Amino acid sequence: MEQRFTELRCKEVININDGCRLGYVGDLDVRIPEGEITAIIVPGPLKFFGLLGRGEEYYIPWRCIKRIGGDVILIEHSFPHREGETPRRGKRRA
């Protein structure tokens, strides 16, 4: 499989453990001598409409990627929740 980084940046990352949409690929972690990709990095969610910056970025090891499709990258990874933080849920539409 050959893909350019610009093609990976257009794919949305979805965690199949909880169905959470994490965002789009922002960067790659690469071992230079071997040319091996070790992880993808997804920027964290915006804080207060982007005025306060972003949350922590998601560092997803390459071994956690289960499938790369035409539009999405499916991963299987559990992220630790901070104390007092509840998992985000999508908005319901009436």
Image (cartoon, rainbow, N blue to C red):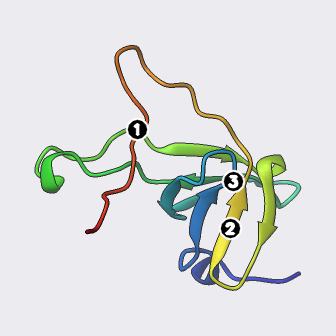
Q: Are marks 1 and 2 in contact (CB under 8 Å)?
A: no
Q: Residues within 10 Å of mark 1 (few under 14, many from 20)?
A: few
Question: Is residue 31 or residue 48 the one in the foreground?
Answer: 48
Q: Where is residue 80 shown, x and y percent of the image?
A: 56, 25
Sequence-first disc among 1 and 3? 3
The amino acid type of the residue labelled 3 equals Ile
Q: Residue at x 54, y 80 (%)?
A: 10
Q: Are marks 1 and 3 in contact (CB under 8 Å)?
A: no
Q: Quadrant of residue 34?
A: bottom right
Q: Which residue is mark 3?
A: 16
Sequence-first disc among 1 and 2? 1
Camera-near label (1 vs 3) is 3
Q: Is residue 90 above or below residue 11?
A: above
Q: Residue at x 37, y 55 (%)?
A: 90
Residue occupying the far top of the picture: 83
Question: Is residue 29 or residue 58 the one in the foreground?
Answer: 58
The amino acid type of the residue labelled 1 equals Glu
**What numbered label is drawn on residue 73?**
2
The secondary element bearing badge 1 is classed as loop
Q: Which residue is mark 1?
A: 56
